[in-house]
Amino acid sequence: MRLALAHLGKRESLEALLKALSPLARAAREEGAGLLLLPELVLGKMPSPPLPEALSALAQETGILLVAGHLGEGPRNRLQVFPEGPVYDKVHLYLPLGEEGDRGLLHGKGPVAFPWRGRSFGLALCYDLDFPELFRAYALKGVQAFLVGAAWPGAYAGLLEVLARARAAENQAYLFLASRADTGSPTLFIAPDGRVLGRREEEGLLLAEPDWGFLEAYREKYPLLRHRREEAYRVR
């Protein structure tokens, strides 16, 4: 199984996005990838009603799943699987003092996972990485990999990597992170033991090939989820 992660900057129009994305999707397909993950809000917070139809058409044309962040109805910060996959709306909105962030958007209702080629994938967006509870909820439901779109400020790129590696390691899951190139943060492919297996910092594709045998052996040797003690986590 091979996936591709697009390190792609925000575009100001759907036409500009498709001009940049179409060759990336075709290149990903030629490299043997069956899924292409895009960053968060690829058009920023600009509404674009034709975007879902356009991305569905591109996914069908190239024969590849597109997982893309865009502004959904509500409005909500959305990560959607095209052509006909599930929709995840960002649960944790980024609302820092003095910054625009996700202001004006609505919260999503909860985690969304989907099966693909015999594996279970959980969806998340950017600031969600600050909340380990979401990723643990996925892991307890059998999710083996996380697909995360991000537009994380480059000034805190070091924190982004720390959080992404932690979410992967503490849940013994692969984590695929596609960052917007205009933010200055990297796109990352992270192993279930927290190692960074791939990184991209310039526009283009990062190819990722997870080793599911390693994941299963690692979980068997270090069964973290089975060692949890819910009854001991209540503060007295």
Image (tube, rainbow, N blue to C red):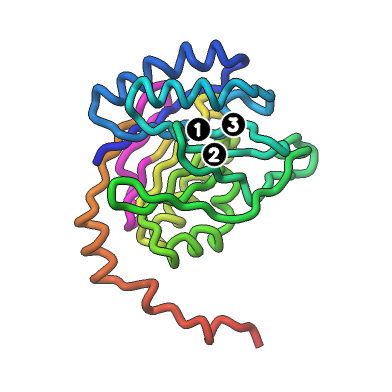
What percent of the width, then of the height, locates residue 227?
38, 79
Amino acid carrying mark 2 in the image: Leu
Helix, strand or loop for disc 1: strand
Helix, strand or loop for disc 2: strand
What percent of the width, then of the height, locates residue 19?
47, 11
Report if residue 197 lies within the magenta region.
Answer: yes
Relative placement, left or right, of 163 versus 2 is right
Instruction: Count neighbours of disc 2 (C-alpha within 10 A) and say few if under 14, some if 14 to 19, many if 20 or more.
Output: many
Q: Label 1 near label 2: C-beta < 8 Å?
A: yes
- The residue under label 3 is 70
Q: Earlier in the sequence, mark 2 or mark 3?
A: 3
- The residue under label 2 is 79
Amino acid carrying mark 3 in the image: His
Check the picture and name the quadrant holding the C terminus: bottom right
Relative vertical location of residue 222 with respect to residue 209 in this rendering, above or below: below
Is residue 154 at least partly visible in the picture? no
Relative vertical location of residue 79 with respect to residue 6 in this rendering, above or below: below
Q: Label 1 near label 3: C-beta < 8 Å?
A: yes
Q: Earlier in the sequence, mark 2 or mark 1?
A: 1
Q: Nearer the viewer, residue 200 or 25?
A: 25
Residue range (magenta)? 189-205
Is residue 46 at least partly visible in the picture? yes
Amino acid carrying mark 1 in the image: Ala
Q: How far apart are the two marked residues, 2 and 3, measured between alpha carbons?
A: 6 Å
Q: Quadrant of residue 26?
A: top left
Q: How far apart are the two marked residues, 2 and 1, measured between alpha carbons?
A: 5 Å
Check the picture and name the quadrant holding the N terminus: top left
- The residue under label 1 is 68
Relative placement, left or right, of 9 versus 95 is left
Q: Quadrant of residue 14?
A: top right
What percent of the width, then of the height, locates residue 114?
42, 50
Residue at 73% in and 40% down: 105
